[in-house]
Amino acid sequence: MPKVRFEPSGVEVETAEGTTILDAALEADVELDHNCGGNCACSTCHVIVDSGIESVNPITEDEQDMLDEAIGLTENSRLACQCQLTKNVTVTIPDTSAQFADFDDFD
Ligand code: FES
């Protein structure tokens, strides 16, 4: 069974092959936004796959289109609701709240 480690919390969960990273996060009570309910219609479930990216399903055009809206995009970025597990991975959940913190400086 594939195992997911979520950073920065360090929480790990084993899950069935084919489970999405979002469903693994929900199983493990890891906080991960998913405003559209996992329908590839937002970018709030953006995660960065730090290790094991070669073992997950290929990105689709629809996922890439939504992912382009994500804040802090990297070449290992995926939408957690579209990314299915087959082997162990480590993912980072970006701290989007920190990226908006500077907006207070515009007063
Ligand atoms: S929850 Fe909206 S795209 Fe994943």
Image (tube, rainbow, N blue to C red):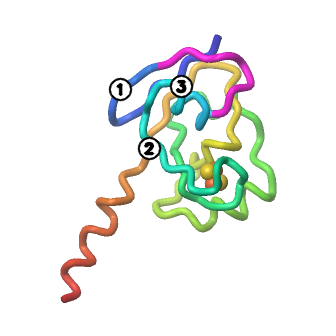
At numbered mark 1, what does the secondary structure look like: helix, strand or loop?
Answer: loop
Q: Identity of the amino acid at label 2?
A: Ile
Label 1 or label 3, whichever lies nearer to me, is 3
Q: Which residue is mark 3?
A: 27
Which one is nearer the viewer's eye here, 67 or 104? 104
Measured as percent of width and height from the top left, residue 51 is found at 53, 30
Q: Identity of the amino acid at label 1?
A: Gly
Q: Which mark is residue 93?
A: 2
Q: Which mark is residue 72?
A: none
The main secondary structure of the magenta stretch is loop
Which one is nearer the viewer's eye here, 82 or 39? 39
Measured as percent of width and height from the top left, residue 10 is found at 35, 26
Label 1 crowd (10 A; few <14 / some 14-19 / many >=20):
few
Q: Identity of the amino acid at label 3?
A: Glu
**Quarter location, residue 105:** bottom left
**Residue 14 counted in the magenta span:** yes
Measured as percent of width and height from the top left, residue 8 is found at 34, 36
Q: What residue do we see at 73% from left, 55% from top?
A: 63
User: Which quarter shows the N terminus?
Assistant: top right
The earlier-in-sequence mark between 1 and 3 is 1
The earlier-in-sequence mark between 2 and 3 is 3
**Quarter location, residue 23:** top right
The residue segment tinted magenta is 13-20
Q: Which mark is residue 10?
A: 1
Label 3 crowd (10 A; few <14 / some 14-19 / many >=20):
few
**Residue extending farthest bottom:** 107
Measured Cα–Cα span from mark 2 to mark 3: 16 Å
